[in-house]
Image (cartoon, grey):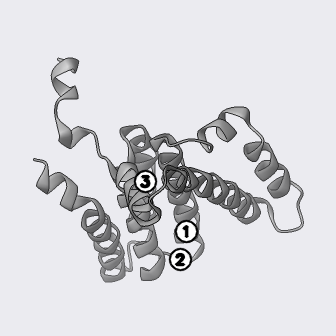
Amino acid sequence: FLYELKSVYMLWPCGPYFLFAFFLKIAGSIFAARFVSVLCGGAIVFLIYKIAQNLFGEKSLIPKFSAIFVGFLPQFTFLSAYINPDIVTALATTLLVYASIYFLENKMSLKSALFLGVSAGAVVLCKISGYAVLCTTYALVLVSVSLRKKYFIQNMKVFFTIFGSSILVFGWFFVRNH
């Protein structure tokens, strides 16, 4: 059964490969595609710093130490050094966690809902291993929207903004490959 699933393109999104190929085509060098991984690694360290700063405050040392800890992990440094879709998936999931925090901090505004939806769409385009964080984020959205019962119209706008923008980001891939 699992062998048959490997031949289904729909289950193996190739968003990171499009990103690598885009930079390879522009620069004409394999080092440009490797540089995408380096940029993704740097962006992850920055987002980890921002997430920890939102959770623990700006004056705490935890944001600095968490960014240093992640940046100097040997596995992370290795993944950031060569062409690998795992680092792009890690960036997309880290961006999704940051977008979730941003969504809750901004009282579920439409701007934060759009950011959350685009981040969720990027995770779907990356790799199946990021779907666990995606399910957790959708559960967070459903719970937070359901807790605000007296703002039904605003909740529906937020709900459809999140799911609509995420479907706009990843829908083309699944429609084309179905």
Instruction: Indicate which disc, 1 or 3, sits on the residue closer to the N terminus.
Output: 3
Could you tell me how far apart the alpha carbons at marks 1 and 2 are, in whole angstroms?
5 Å
**In-image side of 4 versus 93 (left or right):** left
Visible residue check, residue 85: yes
Q: Which mark, by number, is residue 20?
A: 3
**Quarter the N terminus occupies:** top left
Q: Nearer the viewer, residue 49 or 158?
A: 49
Percent across and percent down for residue 161 are 32, 74
| Residue type, label 3 | Phe
List the residue tagged with mark 1: 104
Please tell me whether mark 3 sits on a helix, a strand or a loop. Answer: helix
Q: Are marks 1 and 3 in contact (CB under 8 Å)?
A: no
For disc 2, the marked residue is 107
Q: Is residue 32 above or below residue 132?
A: below
Residue displayed at 74% across by 37% down: 73
Q: Does label 2 or label 3 sit earlier along the sequence?
A: 3
The amino acid beneath tag 2 is Lys
Q: Which residue is at 38% across, 61% downward? A: 25
Foreground disc of the pair 2, 3 = 3
